[in-house]
Image: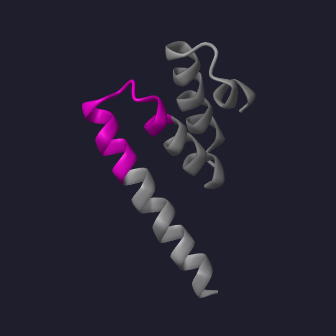
């Protein structure tokens, strides 16, 4: 049970940190991918897809983003 809370807290912190960093560098592919993965694991698929689509706009040949 505790592991679930720890994971939820870690995901919240990761999302918060990546979102803040993306405010400064909105086209950072690594941050977009990280936030997209965190959002997908949190069940927020539409938001995750938006981040992955943004990556593909920046780097059309980005295989990981295109697969998601």
Which span is picked out in magenta? 17-32
Residue 11, percent from left and from top: 50, 61
Q: How many numbered dots are placed on residues in this image? A: 0
Q: At which x and y percent is residue 29? A: 47, 29
- Residue name at image x 52 percent, y 22 percent: 54
Q: Is residue 50 above or below residue 16?
A: above
Q: Position of residue 9 (x, y in %)?
A: 47, 70
Residue 41 in picture, x, y percent from top left = 64, 53
For the point 47% across and 36% down, which residue is it?
30
* Residue 12, picture quadrant: bottom left
Which image quarter is the N terminus in? bottom right
Rendered residue at 28%/34% (across/down): 23
Q: Nearer the viewer, residue 62 or 67?
A: 62
Q: Is residue 52 above or below residue 14?
A: above
Instruction: Tell whether position 63 is magenta.
Output: no
Residue found at the far left of this picture: 24
Identify the main secondary structure in magenta: helix
């Amino acid at each position: 049970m505790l592991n679930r809370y720890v994971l939820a807290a870690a995901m919240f912190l990761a999302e918060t940190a990546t979102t803040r960093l993306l405010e400064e560098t909105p086209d950072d592919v690594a941050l977009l991918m990280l936030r997209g993965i965190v959002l997908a694991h949190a069940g927020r698929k539409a938001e995750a897809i938006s981040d992955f689509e943004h990556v593909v706009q920046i780097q059309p040949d980005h295989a990981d983003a295109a697969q998601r």
